[in-house]
Amino acid sequence: MSADPQRWQRLSQRFEELVDLDGPARDVHLAALAREDAAFARELRAMLQADDIAEGLLDAGIADAAPTVLGRLAGADADTAETAAPPFERVGRFRLLQLLGRGGMGEVWLAQASEQGFVQQVALKLLKRGMDSDEIVRRFERERRILAQLHHPNIASFVDGGLAPDGRPWYAMEHVEGVPIALHARQRALDVRERVALVAQVCDAVAHAQTRLVVHRDLKPSNILVGADGQPHVLDFGIAKLLDDTDDAELTRTGVRALSPAYAAPEQASGEPVSTATDVFSLGVVLYELLTGRLPQQRGSPGADGAITIERPSATVRRADAAQRTQAYGERGQAVERLARHMRGDLDTIVLTALRREPERRYASAAALGEDLRRWLDGKPVRARPDSALYRGTRFVQRHRVGVAAAALVLLSLAIGIGVALHQAGEARAAAAAALVAERHAEEQAEVATAVRDFLLQDVIRAANPLNAQLDITLRDALVAAIPRIHARFAGNPRLEGVVRHNLSESLYMAGARPEGAEQAQVALDTLEAAFGRADADALAVRQMLARLLLARDDLDDARRMYADGLAAIPAGAPARLRLPFEVGLAGVDVETDQEERAIATLERLVPQTEAEFGMTEGVHMDALDHLLRAYSQRERNREAIELAHRTRVALERTHDADHPLIARWLEREAIMLRVTERPDEALPLMQRSFESLRKRLGDDHANVHSTRQQLAALLLDMGRPAEAEPLMRQVHEYRVKEFGPDKEHTWLSGIWYARALQANGKLDQARRLFEDTRAAAERVHGVGAGASLPYVQTYGMFLEQTGDTAAALALRRDLLQQSIVALGEEHPSVPMYAWDVAETLASRREDAALIAFCATWMPRWDAQFDGDSRIVDARAWLARAQDATAKR
């Protein structure tokens, strides 16, 4: 066997890819390797054959496995998958077709059931003859019990189980045709984002198991197969642990632990208790290997505190030679700096957090790891933080005295201290560039940043009483606990107090403590404005953050006041980047308060400025484009809206990868506008592309994915495809009810679209209940006759009209028209649409005289507003028919 470390690493990697493949598939890969390096292939084959023998020891214990070892050594290749005869014609309802593989404890057969014309193929695992000791049978049955309780699209599912004709236990599971995840990534030359997204899906599957108190304990590439559809499937829960299973310790004692050392967590190797964090470590190894093409290796020597460090993935990629990178990434591997740049920073931190030696310092679960991977994919701040110098210097104290509480405070210090330092450094650079402050002020800002950092990294942590620290303290708890220390520490220095509170508020908000975060932001604003006035740059930054939160929460009056006060405070001649966020925010409030024309005039002026000042993808520019598109749409300036959406999308595609979330966002916007203008055939491929891109990046149950799913369902309804639309809308509405409750507009909108899908599929009673519930909720929240309630009343009137209850529809629509005039004013563009609804019902009821009189009043408004629209064509047809019918009487 080779002593070359690099060759050994390559052998280990290939071994893990092939070890669980069936004989024919394994031979295909070995033959391909032999053509490149015959000696390497021979070594690898020997390792695989040795593993076949050793696996019996691992699964059954030496005493049980010993009788079979000599025979297997003598003829390990004789009984291959190609020649093995089935021991029975049928097992249960399944006919055995082909041996897929053997382990120490069992055999896995491809089997098939045919019942009433339905054919089902499964992987059937059968306990080996001679392996029926009490402990092994208990272990086999436990594996079957674990698999039976797992139901997830990315886990090979349990199908059936029972006893074979000779009394041996068996179970059947979904047969997955695929290749190991690492091989899939290489064969498809997946980019970094695609690999991360794939592991995020695996995290979902493992998280599902963990919510059922199951820890896999043997996650590795060969246990994660990716099918032709690109979906990963987690296999082999053979050594999984039920966290509440009292028999597990006995089962573990009776045999050598079966695990894969290269992917095993440190606590597995040392025999310590396992937890959900154990699977996190293995997932971290898999992710590291997918990103770098190598297994993680120790970097340098253990430190004084015994810690072992692992080289960052970005550094590993940068050190790899061209051949290694090409093997891992194909042609993409030549762009080494691009690869490293994708990994550097947050992705490095995520991987190293998953690979921390101490379980309590890793992600607590696969769900937490998956969430951070998706935050990285979505361009959001990640939860993980790199180790600080302070952490490494005080690790001994933390381990023996402060424990988790001190670790939480380290995260606190990083979350706030680094943000403060960057904030102050950025302010100093901007001040120098704009010549707004003297050089001395810039130096003072650097001193401020240092003072704040020292406080957060040292004083706050030292203030924690290790004797009183709760071992289960969370980051949120630690952040809240830090609030009282700020005023005492910075008494007499409002600059530091305000900046610290601002950064603390953002950390609180991200940690889920939103009320406390908003409160600290307000205290920061009050502190800074009282000491330095409203024009102070730090005060303006806090005000902008508060205003944006208010706008997002639909607190429109408070948002307008906050934006306007900030804009008024900015002195003449100040940099545009101070003024523009407030002007864009005020225009956004105008859009939401039915002042679209004013918003359009403002935003058409601001959009070129925001792009020049901030760049195409920065938040302020994207906000300006979003507000402008919404204003165009609400004023039915559809041609301009489509042009804006298309222009923005094309510009983004020139500078970003095809699956960038901003591109998905603007694909959806363009598709929506095409749908509004009755161009569904053009809209559908754009909407489908947006939906699949978002689902690939964010998973199936993300809020943004549900939003696009709703738009796709609405488009399918427009195209007369309700059978496809209904299940999509059901998913969206169930999510919204769970996420927002019954009294939020998000829930009402999904309820309307779900009701429309039900109606289109003939489920009228269910649809009526949903329409009625939505109208009642809107009127309960906004008030009867309020402008915000009217669209929900309108949809109920449409349902009544379409289902033939025209008397009720006419009464409701007449009342709605009067309410709209009172609430919105007669000149509002929505009022003619409510009038058109009345005309529609008069026409359907053949109330000709009333229709003629009504049209005489409203036709001029319809002509002006609906020019070229099908509604004016309909209205003229109704009027002509009524006049003709009246003339014939």
Image (cartoon, rainbow, N blue to C red):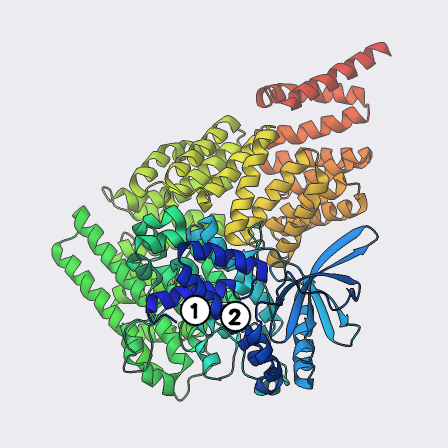
Residue furthest out toward the front: 74
Residue furthest out toward the bottom: 467
Crowding at label 1, few (<14), some or many (≥20) Cα neighbours within 10 Å? Answer: many
Residue 482 relative to residue 26: left or right: left
Residue 722 relative to residue 572: left or right: right
Residue 149 relative to residue 692: left or right: right
Q: Which mark is residue 354?
A: 1
Residue 807 sits in quarter: top right
Q: Could you tell me which quadrant the C terminus lies in?
A: top right
Q: Is residue 490 above or below residue 313?
A: below
In the picture of the structure, the residue carrying the numbered disc 2 is 49
Q: What residue type is disc 2 on?
A: Gln
Query: Residue at horizontal 29%, vertical 74%?
Result: 457
Q: Where residue 474 appears, x then y in whole percent?
A: 46, 74
Instruction: Check disc 1 and report its element: helix, strand or loop.
Output: helix
Q: Where residue 846 appears, x then y in whole percent?
A: 82, 23
Label 2 – label 1 distance at C-alpha: 32 Å
Say which label, 2 or 1, has the lower sequence index: 2
Q: What residue type is disc 1 on?
A: Ala
Q: Could you tell me which quadrant the N terminus lies in?
A: bottom left
Q: Is residue 5 above or below residue 683?
A: below
